[in-house]
Amino acid sequence: MAFSEDQPKHERIFSLKEATGLIPQLETHLVAAKEGKTVLLETKDEIKKACANSHLGGGSVMGPRYIHSLTAN
């Protein structure tokens, strides 16, 4: 994609070496995000049921796993 003269130019924040050095850290975060997404997708239906029954006290056997996936770093 070509840049036109009226678009602002951005200064580099990282050198190529610095950016390359951050790849392992980014991969770790990406894996954690994918794992969290998997948990959320796996527990979605149970959590919806618990939500629908919240007026009865709610709760789900998946609740702790769901909550942990939301708070995990």
Image (cartoon, rainbow, N blue to C red):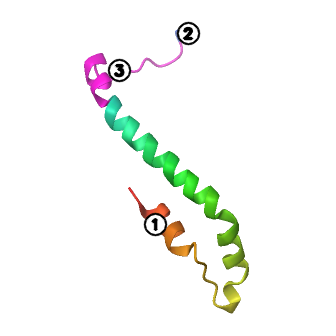
Question: Relative to the observer, which residue lies in front, 7 or 36?
Answer: 36
The answer to whether mark 1 and mark 3 are in CB contact below 8 A is no
Q: Which residue is mark 1?
A: 68
- Which label is found at residue 11? 3
Instruction: Kindly identify the residue that appears in the image at 64 percent across and 85 percent down.
Output: 58
**Which badge, 1 or 3, comes first in the chain's sequence?**
3
Mark 3 vs mark 2, CA separation in Å: 16 Å
Mark 2 vs mark 1, CA separation in Å: 47 Å
Question: Relative to the observer, which residue lies in front, 8 or 51?
Answer: 51
Q: Which residues are magenta?
A: 6-22
- Picture coordinates of residue 24 (x, y %)? 33, 33
**Which badge, 2 or 1, comes first in the chain's sequence?**
2
Q: Amino acid at mark 2?
A: Ser
Q: Amino acid at mark 1?
A: His
Q: Which residue is mark 2?
A: 4
Q: Is residue 10 magenta?
A: yes
